[in-house]
Every structure is written in structure tokens, then in C-alpha cells.
Image: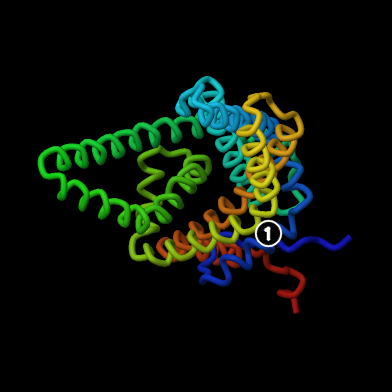
Amino acid sequence: METKEKINFRQVRDFGETFNVSVKFFRQNFKLFFQSLIFIAGPFLLISAVAGAFYQSNAVSMFSISKMGQSNIFSQFGWTYLIFILASILAHMALIGTVFSFMINYMEKGPEGFTVNDVGQTLVKNIGNILSVFFILMFLTIIVIAAAGATIFGLASAVPALGILFGIALFFGILIILPPVMWQLSVVYLIKMQEQGSVFKSFSRTSKALKGNFWWTWVIMVCAVMAIGIISMVFALPQAVYQMVLMFSHIKDASGETSIPFLVVATVCTFCSTLLYSGIYVISAFHYYSLAEQKDGIGLMERIDEIGNTPNNNEELQY
């Protein structure tokens, strides 16, 4: 049986090499990687998909009833919506934790040196790290959103035109900074899990790697999101078509009944689409290792040490 060649993560890579090594990683480890996602993150993804299907079904029913003047469209934001949001958060934390646990095991043990159980154990050991990163980032995100909202509201109250201009500038600013920020918010979990430092130290590591590589990261993340988005359309399209059909049929009869076939279709489509997000996390990880290697050169030093520690052949020295 042919031994698989271990992929070197800590290596400087350009745009094409980053995507090529990600594809190589998936092809080399597809079976074990897929099994890890299904058996570890899968239950959380399934719960999230079911919650999302019930919420969408409820939203369609509420929309059709509101069209008949019997209900307010905002009534769709209830318990089903809250459960869907909480389930989605848990699902994405499980997914990102599983992906990075798999990559950490790969780096330490090679492509054939670990099992799904090893990935699960690594994830369990890092539950505290994952939760600490999530809650701190959520707290900081709330502060930033609240500050931006208060600024817009204050400017709009004082000078409406200035508030509108600030809102437009903020919108375009978000388009510029969002892809690199998305990358940072992803790989900070990997750094925290691997280096076991503080959350702020982990985030500073991403900032150090991003320095001087902002637009490079922007291009890679935009292309990664677009590529995964195009693939996910294969699963999203049947659900969207079915949802439109249900919406128009509910408008006619205003029955508001839950469609079991729609729940099944929405659950399957959402589950598969969410699994595809793992591709973004893998690409983000390889991009981080590339930038970190460019800054620190840790991988090069490790290879030099390996060469220096190669045992001498005493038999050859005798001749």
C-alpha cells in the first residue's frame, strides 16, 4: 500500500498554490475528513438544519397569512427563530472545531496516523478554547455594532444628510474590511487551539500575519467565498424553488400548514450547504500558515533542524 505524502502546512504559498494545496488536502483525506465531519459535527449540523427548516416553513406561513391581513409579518421572529440562531451558532462552532482539530492531528501525526476518535478527542480538549474565543469575539462584535449604530443614529438625528452619508460610507467600508475580518475570526480559533495562548494573543497573531497582506487576504477570501457559494447553489436552488412554490400556494389558500416534504428538502439542503463551509476554513488555515511562515520562518527552521538531526551512517564513516 502506497504511503501518502504529508503536506507541509508551514510553507509560503501564492494565490494558486493556496487553493491547489487545499484541493490536494481534500483529495488526500476525503474519506477520513468526511467521516470526521459527519460523526463529530454532523449531529449539530443536523439539529441546526432541522431548526432552520422549521423556521423557514414558519416564515413562509406567516408571510402568506400577513398577505391576507390576518397577521403581522414580524411575528415570524419568535421562538423558532431564536432556536434556529442558537442551533446555527453551535453547529458552526462544532464545524470549525472539527475542521481545525482534524488539521492539527494531521500536522502532528501525518495523513494516516490518526482516526476520527483522535479528532473528536482533540475537539473535546479544546471546547474551553473554542467557547472562550466565541464569547470574547461576540462581546467585541456587539460593542462595535452598538457603537456604529449609535454613531449613525446620532448623526442622523443632528444632521440627517450627514447620517445618510456616514451610513453609505460604513456600508462600503464593511465591503472592504469584511473578508479579512472573516479570515481573522476563523483562524483565531485555530491559533488558540494549537498554541493554547490567550484569546487576545491569538488575535494579535492574526493581526501580525495580516500586516502587509491585507489585500492579498481580501482577494483569497472573496474568491474562496465565491467558489463555495457557487457550489452551494447546487443545494440551495431546489430549496429556494420549493420555498417559492409554497409561498405562492399559501398566499392562495392561507392555510399556514407545515409542509413535511419541504421540511425534508430544506433540512437536507441546509445540512449539505453548511458542510461546504469547511472548505473556507481549510483555505483560511493554509493562508494563515503561509503568512505566518513568511513572517516567522518556523517551518524553514524545523526543516533545518530535521536535516541537522539526521543520524550519521557509522558504517559509511569506516570506509
Q: Is residue 174 left or right of residue 65?
A: left
Residue lying furthest top: 79
The image quarter in which residue 98 lies: top right
Q: Which element is circle 1 on?
A: helix
Q: Residue at x 28, y 51 (%)?
A: 170
In this orientation, which residue lies closer to the viewer: 301 or 201? 201
Task: Tell me the quadrant of the picture where the N terminus can be found.
Answer: bottom right
In this orientation, which residue lies closer to the viewer: 84 or 282? 84
Residue 240 position within the rendered picture, expressed as x and y whole percent measured from the top left = 64, 46
Residue lying furthest right: 1
Q: Residue at x 64, y 52 (%)?
A: 232
Residue lying furthest bottom: 319
- Residue located beneath label 1 in the image: 25
Residue 207 position within the rendered picture, expressed as x and y whole percent measured from the top left = 35, 53
In this orientation, which residue lies closer to the viewer: 98 or 45? 45
Q: Residue at x 32, y 52 (%)?
A: 171
The image quarter in which residue 9 lies: bottom right
Q: Residue at x 56, y 26 (%)?
A: 65
- Give the crowd class for mark 1: few <14, some 14-19, many >=20 residues within 10 Å: some
In this orientation, which residue lies closer to the viewer: 210 or 263? 263
What colour scheme does the image use? rainbow
Total residue callouts: 1
Q: Is residue 105 visible?
A: no
Residue 113 position within the rendered picture, expressed as x and y whole percent measured from the top left = 75, 48
Q: Is residue 67 left or right of residue 146?
A: right
Task: Tell me the quadrant of the picture where the C terminus can be found.
Answer: bottom right
Q: Is residue 65 visible?
A: yes
Residue 91 position within the rendered picture, expressed as x and y whole percent measured from the top left = 60, 34
124 lies above or below 285: above
Amino acid of disc 1: Phe
The image quarter in which residue 274 lies: top right
